[in-house]
Image (tube, grey):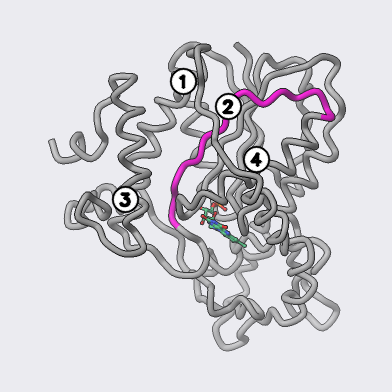
Amino acid sequence: MKILLISFSGTSHTTMCGDYIKKHFEELGHQVDHYSIKHDVPFTYDINAYDLIGFGYPIHAFNAPAAFVKFIKKLPKLKEKKRYFIFKVSGEPFAPNNASSYHSYLKLKRRNFVLFSEKHFLMPYNIIFRYRDSLAKQMYLYLDALTKAYVLELLNEEKPEKLWYAPWHVVWSFLLRIEWVAPFFNSPFVKIKKDRCVNCHKCIKECPVGAMFINKKGKIRIKATKCAMCMRCTMYCPTDAITYGFMNPWKVNKPFLFEKIKKDKDIPAEFVNKDTKGYFKLFNKYFNKQKALLEKYNIPNPIEEYYK
Ligand SMILES: Cc1cc2nc3c(=O)[nH]c(=O)nc-3n(C[C@H](O)[C@H](O)[C@H](O)COP(=O)(O)O)c2cc1C
């Protein structure tokens, strides 16, 4: 098959997930292109020429990011109906996350895209609070194994995974579509700390939607009409120089160095397990479900493999 993956990612977790999906399809002899939505990389693919399309995004406030929805709105109507799947990445396994694609699903349906599978992958939060490295490690180890299982699930025509959600989850995600207005309130209050900024302009160069710019006074500012609230600028700033408006208390600075964390034997590979209590208890339910999927396709448990 010829497969096209189209993903939006703020802090690279969704890109990573798409790259793993690409790798596992390619291992089985399929041809895959992966386009990461970026304001300065034009979309030049002939979407009608592919057998299967995969859309990926990070969940933002129980929704697909506005930047992702804006992109799919620009897609042409397909000449004939085509199947697609969704891979979405987020920090927690709460059920309302399941309905995050509903808005995009309606838009894609009008363009002749037929949804046949959807899968939710857990990766660390890039907002609110920083997950421990051990949880990041557990999620990262699972990502490789799970994307492999998912590719096999997609190729197994029987019944690939589809997420369940109730009508009230759709209502909930609709009510939380704050990303369509929040940048207008937040952006004017985004400031760069002069004493910390080293003028590397990483925030400007790496912003996926081209929202950061230098104004006439030579100051770095953010365009409210463009900001995707993806947190890339705040996470990747090497000197933590960005004060991110009202959302500053939710800022998580410094990206997760997944490969380094993976290699570091002092960091446990399992943070969530059957004894986990409190907030992370639900995560154990998620991992148990994933273990069953891995078993179905005879894929070794990544945590057990790690300790071998
Ligand atoms: C504005 C914003 C809202 C978010 N809302 C949710 C959410 O509703 N549920 C969730 O599980 N994670 C949420 N997250 C966390 C991201 O989905 C998560 O960190 C993901 O790994 C980021 O992927 P990326 O690196 O591809 O952007 C949110 C992140 C941002 C920036």
Query: 75 or 293, which is in the foreground?
Result: 293
Q: On the picture, is 108 further left or further right than 144?
A: right
Question: Looking at the figure, which quarter contains the C terminus?
Answer: top left
Marks 2 and 4 close (CB-CB < 8 Å): no
Q: Bin the neighbour count of mark 2 within 10 Å (Cα to Cα): few under 14, some 14-19, many 20 and up.
A: some
Marks 2 and 3 close (CB-CB < 8 Å): no
Secondary structure beneath disc 4? strand
Q: Earlier in the sequence, mark 4 or mark 1?
A: 4
In the picture, residue 36 is in which quadrant? top right
Marks 3 and 4 close (CB-CB < 8 Å): no
Mark 2: which amino acid? Ser
- The residue segment tinted magenta is 110-124
State yes or no: residue 190 in magenta: no
Q: Marks 2 and 3, Cα distance to the nearest angstrom? A: 26 Å
Q: Is residue 197 above or below residue 1?
A: below
| Residue corresponding to mark 2 | 117
Query: 170 or 240, which is in the foreground?
Result: 170
Mark 4: which amino acid? Ser
Count the marks.
Answer: 4
Q: Bin the neighbour count of mark 3 within 10 Å (Cα to Cα): few under 14, some 14-19, many 20 and up.
A: many
| Residue corresponding to mark 4 | 36
Q: On the picture, is 285 further left or further right than 276?
A: right
Q: Position of residue 47 (x, y in %)?
A: 76, 23
| Residue corresponding to mark 3 | 137
Mark 1: which amino acid? Glu
State yes or no: residue 120 in magenta: yes
Q: Residue at x 53, y 64 (%)?
A: 236
Q: Earlier in the sequence, mark 3 or mark 4?
A: 4
Q: Marks 1 and 2, Cα distance to the nearest angstrom? A: 9 Å
Q: Bin the neighbour count of mark 4 within 10 Å (Cα to Cα): few under 14, some 14-19, many 20 and up.
A: many
